[in-house]
Image: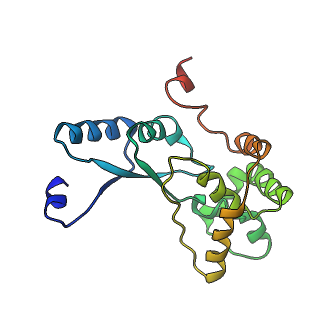
Amino acid sequence: MEQLVREGKITYVGSSNFAGWQIATAQNAAADRHFMGLVSEQSLYNLTARTVELEVIPALRHYGIGLIPWSPLGGGLLGGVLQKVENGRRASAQMQQTIERHRPRLEAYEALCAEIGAQPADVALAWLLRNPVLTAVMVGPRTPEQLAGSRQALEVQLSDDTLRKLDEIWPGPGGEAPEAYAW
């Protein structure tokens, strides 16, 4: 990667799906070589998938690296899937199984979103955007309406009470490592 930067073929280097120790190793190796190192990490991160909170996010914060989450809406699960299915949208067999596995959480989540007057997708994106380590949230809208809807996430303000309720519905790993599991 250093050679590609020197040749002007790339400007910055990012990683994807690195563990916290790999991020630390990469940054220390880059520092030893007087190279900038990683500037971003792309990891699976959303309300339903919070494992990166254990070690990846603390490593990113320590090294000043930005996080770009992939699957910010959990493959559609956090986009109001129950309401969409009830309104006749078809779901694959795999998605139907996922919905059934998470149905109690999805019902509580969509009810909370309705209670605060926000669309489920907007709440999921707003939850991500409040994390200072995040560089950007990339979404893949299929329609102009979905794009406009995603921009609404910038307007959603999540109160401490709402954040607490989201943690109850979609619990994270319990904090950062090693405190989350060692004491």
Report the residue at 58% width, 31% height from top. Answer: 175
Residue 121 shows in this picture = no
Report the residue at 59% width, 62% height from top. Answer: 94
Q: Nearer the viewer, residue 65 or 177?
A: 65
Q: Nearer the viewer, residue 38 or 119?
A: 38
Q: Is residue 77 above or below residue 170?
A: below
Q: Quadrant of residue 14?
A: bottom left
Left of 81 or right of it: where is 52?
A: left
Numbered circles on residues, count: 0
Quadrant in which the N terminus is drawn? bottom left
Report the residue at 74% width, 49% height from top. Answer: 105
Q: Residue 153, how many percent across, how many down? A: 67, 63
Q: Residue furthest top?
A: 183
Quadrant in which the C terminus is drawn? top right
Q: Residue 39, how many percent across, how many down? A: 35, 51
Left of 40 or right of it: where is 70?
A: right
Q: Residue 172, how many percent across, how many down? A: 62, 39
Report the residue at 65% width, 57% height from top. Answer: 126
Residue 55 shows in this picture = yes
Q: Quadrant of residue 100?
A: bottom right
Q: Nearer the viewer, residue 119 or 85?
A: 119
Q: Residue 162, how many percent across, how many down? A: 77, 46
Q: Residue furthest bottom?
A: 144
Q: Quadrant of residue 119?
A: bottom right
Left of 120 or right of it: where is 42?
A: left
